[in-house]
Amino acid sequence: MGSLALLGAMPELSVFQYNLVDNIFSMTVATMGAAALFFFMGRSTVGVAYRPALMVSGIVVAIACYHYFMIRHSWQDAYQLSDGTKYVGTGAAFNDFYRYADWILTVPLLMVELVVVMRLAQSRATSLLTRLVIAAALMIALGYPGEVIQDPAGITMRWVWFGLSCIPFVYILYVLWVELTQSLETQPEAARGLISLARVVILVTWMVYPIAYALGSTPGALEAAAGSGGDPSGLVGLQVGYAIADMTAKAGFGVLIYFIARAKTYEDSKKGIGLEDVPTPIVATA
Amino acid sequence: MGSLALLGAMPELSVFQYNLVDNIFSMTVATMGAAALFFFMGRSTVGVAYRPALMVSGIVVAIACYHYFMIRHSWQDAYQLSDGTKYVGTGAAFNDFYRYADWILTVPLLMVELVVVMRLAQSRATSLLTRLVIAAALMIALGYPGEVIQDPAGITMRWVWFGLSCIPFVYILYVLWVELTQSLETQPEAARGLISLARVVILVTWMVYPIAYALGSTPGALEAAAGSGGDPSGLVGLQVGYAIADMTAKAGFGVLIYFIARAKTYEDSKKGIGLEDVPTPIVATA
């Protein structure tokens, strides 16, 4: 996959392996589409102040729905059944870049939906978002050169890029953990448990990404990718792992944002703020 | 079709049999899509408290609409007309997994829409949903290994998986029956008849699933599936049965949820709660 994708050589897969990846891609399309409907429709059940957060959650999964549709299409284009017993490459390229295009667009938006639902003071929100968005861009940009190395001889460089990408990755998780912990006190009682949970959800769901990358970075996986024997199961694990991580980190996380928005809407209603009342600008809610 | 699906061998069908399945799939796409429009639009006619239930009902049928569209596509890919008198396999696989992917996503959501419209106390709702979602996952996971057995020699195992899958199936129906019966007293007068009806609707519509599974599990059906003679009408019955069950258990059941939401909205209005008033969190409505 990756640079091989550019050359159009694909490792031979069993019927089960091919179908596992194909079906997970389809299920991801359905999950992301369903989540987009949920977040877009859910806007009318939260106060105006929280609707942008749900809107952004919906846009994240809509972008992912599109990309997984294209990823699946590319997967089906790249493989054909051979002898009715295995799947071999057609010569067409499997395009891994869809996933990185998706991440470039959606990871910053995931940061935005979290900051927006928290309704942090503007100065704090701006500083936080600037750091998070730059770190996310670095994380993705440093991961990609490693992802496209499929030659067993390049295994060291694949892990070097992995290590470099992990620096902003760990930085993002650290900043979010500290920030969310600090903000707990300023958030309404009813939302504290959910925001506390959000810290853990981010940590756990994001951890699947480096695991998936690692599965595709073993000597066996790289040999399979290069078409020189090896075991393609790590490559299958990489595709399945990224899909599961995307479902939980985007759709699952968005559901949590929805519940935070619901809890804060109810707290607001106790202060006499109705669903359709115009919210104060975020800068004033420090 | 199942494991056969993976190998791409399909039992020979009459023109009538092929078209019956193909047309039922198309009708299911239309029904699910129409139901999604109904539930999404219907949200504005019920109070804010009940909109999440309609939203989830709509998402369930939207997911099913996607999957039946893909199921039909796969069906048409898997068959071709031969001699103008019968349908034979093209070698392409019919993908049964779409249906199981659909169930994995939608059956838990069906439980959610029921619990949400009831507005049970949070502790009770959490306990109920946990049990129902685990049982639903078990039911689907235990059904699939049996579904993909298409070899007449595997008939015993096919029925063993059926029996195992029926344990959580019966547990879900039992829990829902008891829960709905107990909750009747706490529900407003106007909704009681509908909730009482919901118990029966769940029981009757869900019963079609094991019947459809059984139709595809006779010796004749398995011989047909394995391409060694036999009678494929059981396999046709399985496809038609699942489609009918999905239409009634998802779209039909959702309509009932809509009427319950309408009845409860009216009861709320008598207490001065308007359509757009922020509802109390479910925890407070025990």
Image (spheres, coloured by chain):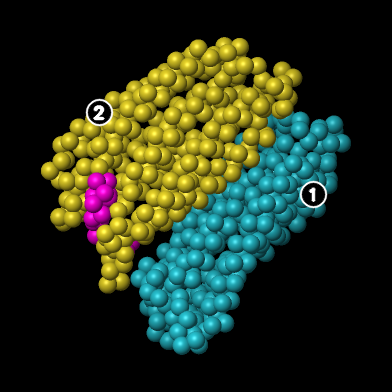
Chain colours: A yellow, B cyan
Q: Nearer the viewer, residue A167 or B139?
A: A167
Image quadrant containing the N terminus of chain B: bottom left
Horizontal placement of B259 versus A124: left or right?
right
Task: Classify residue A12 as left or right of residue B233.
Answer: left
Give the residue pinned by disc 2.
A164
Between label 2 and label 1, give the one nearer the viewer. 2
Asked whether A73 or B29 is in front, the reply is A73
Residue drawn 60% across the image and 39% down it: A40
Residue at the limit of the structure toward the left, as seen here: A153
Residue B140's disc number? none
Give the residues in magenta: A1-17
At x 50% / y 47%, what residue is drawn?
A31
Relative to A173, B96 lies left or right = right
In this picture, is B137 found above or below B272?
A: below
Q: Position of residue B34 (x, y in %)?
A: 67, 57
Q: Where is residue A168? Give x, y as percent.
A: 32, 25
Magenta stretch encompasses residue B167 = no
Q: Which secondary structure, mark 2?
A: helix
The three-letter code of the residue at mark 2 reads Leu
Q: Secondary structure at mark 1?
A: helix
* Residues packed near mark 2 inside 10 Å, few (<14), some (14 to 19) or many (20 plus): some
- The image position of residue B238, as x and y in percent, is 54, 72
Q: Is residue B142 left or right of residue A141?
A: right
Residue that mark 1 sits on? B192
Host chain of mark 1: B
Say if labels 2 and 1 share a chain.
no
Residue type marked 1: Arg
| Membership of A16 in magenta stretch | yes
- Where residue A78 appears, as percent x and y from the top left, is 32, 58
Q: Which residue is depicted at the point 63% across and 58% down?
A: B32
Q: Residue at x 17, y 36 (%)?
A: A157
Q: CA distance from mark 2 to mark 1?
A: 61 Å
